[in-house]
Image: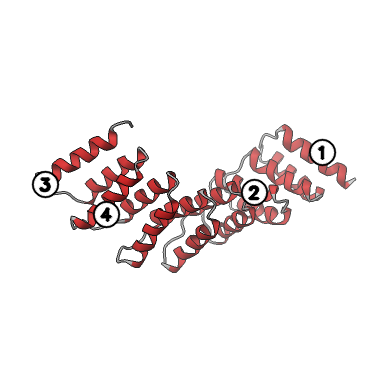
């Protein structure tokens, strides 16, 4: 992407100079080119220029700028822009919230990320599975297993579809936190609604029971694993053996 953003910027400049009809799609495409090349300052500048050229801001452009800032470590600037837009007349959408959540969580700002997840409901936005899956993954990676599990459980309550990655992230976070009770609740709900799961899902859950010395629960999960023809790995078998040894 060495010169992609410069080329896009040049084309936009030509269009402006020739007074061609330019809409938000053209601006957002140029901002996106800057984002892909980690040119967060250019992306931020272009977003500001949209207002000066009487081009309406939209959720696509805002989310792109926030991602550009977030991926470059400028989460504070991302949140400042998000706050300004929140107080303005722009109707924030799920994409902007998702970008802001990831930007905050990526740099350990989990309280802000948590607030953003809750704010989506305040703004009467649909907390869709993509947004919550993203939040679960970043919380789990940051070691905030309790929040990851709470979100995973909330997905079951709200009947949102979790994907295998977020499901495994939440289960794995609970396993590391030795919270077999919450792991059991989340796992039961997701298996019940036939969410996708794999050997990693079962292995993490069995390990959580093993750490909690709950051999009965581990045994039940192992049986479910076999019944659903999920290939058991060495780790799952070893965790099951260890759990049974503790229970004997």
Label 2 vs 1, first from the N-terminus: 2
Q: Residue at x 28, y 37 (%)?
A: 5
Q: For the residues carrying marks 4 and 2, which lies nearer the camera in this image?
A: 4
Q: In the rendered view, does 196 fall on the left or right side of 247?
A: left
Q: Give yes or no for contact between labels 4 and 2 (Cβ–Cβ under 8 Å).
A: no
Give the Cα separation between the discs numbered 1 and 3.
Answer: 71 Å
Q: Residues within 10 Å of mark 1 (few under 14, many from 20)?
A: some
Task: Assign the N terminus to one quadrant of the image.
Answer: top left
SS at mark 2 in the image = helix
Residue at label 2? Answer: 173
Q: Earlier in the sequence, mark 4 or mark 3?
A: 3
Q: Is residue 133 something one can see in this rendering?
A: no
Residue at image x 50%, y 49%?
134
In primary-sequence order, the first of circles 4 and 2 is 4
Discs 2, 1 touching: Cβ within 8 Å: no
Residue in front for this viewpoint, 112 or 235? 112
Q: Residue at x 87, y 47 (%)?
A: 247
Disc 1 target residue:
241
Q: Which mark is residue 20?
A: 3
- Please name the residue shown 47% across and 50% down the image: 102
Q: Secondary structure at mark 1?
A: helix
Residue 10: percent from left, percent from top: 20, 38
């Amino acid at each position: 992407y060495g010169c992609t953003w410069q080329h896009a910027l040049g084309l936009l400049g030509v269009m402006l100079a020739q007074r061609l009809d330019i809409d938000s799609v053209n601006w957002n495409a140029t901002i996106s080119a800057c984002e892909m090349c980690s040119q967060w300052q250019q992306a931020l500048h272009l977003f500001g220029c949209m207002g000066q050229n009487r081009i309406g801001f939209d959720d696509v452009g805002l989310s792109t700028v926030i991602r550009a800032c977030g991926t470059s470590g400028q989460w504070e600037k991302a949140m400042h822009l998000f706050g300004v837009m929140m107080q303005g007349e722009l109707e924030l959408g799920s994409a902007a919230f998702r970008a802001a959540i990831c930007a905050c969580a990526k740099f350990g700002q989990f309280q802000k990320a948590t607030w953003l997840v809750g704010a989506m409901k305040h703004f009467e936005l649909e907390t869709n599975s993509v947004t919550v899956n993203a939040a679960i993954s970043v919380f789990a990676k940051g070691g905030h297993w309790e929040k990851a599990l709470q979100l995973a459980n909330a997905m079951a309550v709200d009947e949102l579809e979790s994907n295998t990655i977020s499901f495994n992230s939440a289960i794995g976070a609970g396993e590391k936190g030795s919270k077999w009770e919450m792991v059991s609740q989340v796992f039961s709900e997701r298996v019940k609604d036939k969410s996708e799961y794999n050997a990693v899902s079962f292995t993490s859950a069995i390990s959580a029971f093993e750490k909690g010395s709950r051999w009965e629960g581990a045994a039940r999960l192992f049986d479910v694993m076999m019944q659903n023809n999920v290939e058991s790995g060495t780790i799952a078998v070893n965790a099951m053996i260890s759990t049974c040894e503790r229970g004997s």
